[in-house]
Amino acid sequence: MDQPISSEFVKGLAKDLGADLVGIASAKTLNTFPPDPSVPQTPERISPYCKSVIVIASRIPVAVFRSKSGAAVQYMDMLVLRRMDRIAAKIASHLEDLGYPSFTTAAQETDWDYKRASYGRLSTRHLGVEAGLGTLGLDVNILTPEYGPRVYLTGILTELELQPDERITEQVCIGESCSRCLHSCPTNAVEHFNLNKRACAKAAQEFGFMTSLALWEAMIDGNSERKKQLSVSRDMFGFWQGMLRVVGSFGDCPRCLAVCPVGNDYHAFLAKPQKAIPERTEEKVAKGKRFKEARASGKTSSGLSDYNIRWVGEEGYQGMVARQLQEFKKKQKLRAESDKKTASKLETGQ
Ligand code: SF4
Ligand code: SF4
């Protein structure tokens, strides 16, 4: 190639195709810093030729977090993922047309040769951090300054060498003094910059793999009466619906996404409806306080270890959300003034 392709070109392409956020991570860095070195989720385990990973994010429409039930978010999650996968496939094809072999992997996958839990060949949240799109929160969701945790991400592995983005070293998550994700969690799965995945799956994957497995085990072992009961049970309906629409098999629980105060989408549309957290209990508040004290006294959890801190933000929380809110309010004020002027002009006919 006599004309090397720049990161700016690739980012422009991704945005033109509909990505909401885009960043570049170097394959070398991803290979050097796997999220869990004992089971490395690295590009080199997938392709020895990959030089860069283009990371795109698609936001989940904020309206679903204003709705009365989790049903809205479940269906939109699936649509957002499908749309994002199509954008990623188009980017890969375009780069191949330009002479650079590129492909994308499934954003939501589990490789059982790696770990017996939700654990894909790459961790998209860690890709996002390395590509400068955000940092991990108390609940280990990636928090982007623009949309908080209300995003899905995927990566395009390419043999094109691109200038990588800088990682954000400031903690985007407000941290222990916020703990809103912890307070909202119905299964108490949020730990100290860590997540109890099994507990989370009870609410987030109501009809996911474990439920389906239990259903079919009971079907096989049950007598004919039990089989009849199960064939018309809620779990069977959930399984069928999961197959048909993917609804119920992942992303069922929107709570930690809905209440996280990071992102202008929160300031604009969620601050009011999500202000109160009905699931908040004294026990959960005490848990958040324990985390705060532990951090203040230097008793770090594994999520904050010297190795893991790169994904949380080495600089700690520096007030990003407060700055963001001030900026947002300033813009709102300016817009209100301009609307007022326009209305008055229309009224007076000037
Ligand atoms: S998705 Fe739901 S169950 Fe899982 S951590 Fe978030 S609030 Fe808890
Ligand atoms: S809700 Fe608060 S503590 Fe939880 S991830 Fe968001 S900012 Fe961090």
Image (cartoon, rainbow, N blue to C red):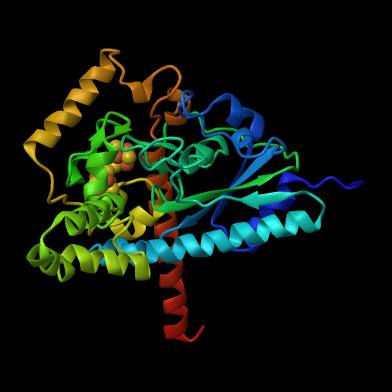
The relative height of residue 109 versus residue 62 in the rendered view (above or below) is above
In the rendering, at what x and y percent does residue 30 appear?
58, 31
Q: Nearer the viewer, residue 179 or 317?
A: 179
Q: State the residue lying farthest toward the bottom.
A: 349
Task: Please indicate whether residue 222 sits to the left or right of residue 90 in the image.
Answer: left
Q: Nearer the viewer, residue 57 or 250?
A: 250
In the rendering, at what x and y percent does residue 339 appear?
43, 71
Q: How many numbered marks does the figure carry?
A: 0
Locate residue 347: give its quadrant.
Answer: bottom left
Task: Please indicate whether residue 42 sits to the left or right of residue 152 in the image.
Answer: right
Q: Would residue 111 be visible to someone looking at this image?
A: yes
The relative height of residue 237 versus residue 195 in the rendered view (above or below) is below
Which residue is pictured at 48% across the width and 86% down the height?
349
Q: Would residue 68 be visible to someone looking at this image?
A: no
In the rendering, at what x and y percent does residue 137 appear?
36, 36
Which residue is pictured at 59% across the width and 24% down the height?
32
Q: State the residue lying farthest toward the right.
A: 2
Which residue is pictured at 17% across the width and 44% down the height?
187
Task: Please indicate whether residue 8 sits to the left or right of residue 114 in the image.
Answer: right
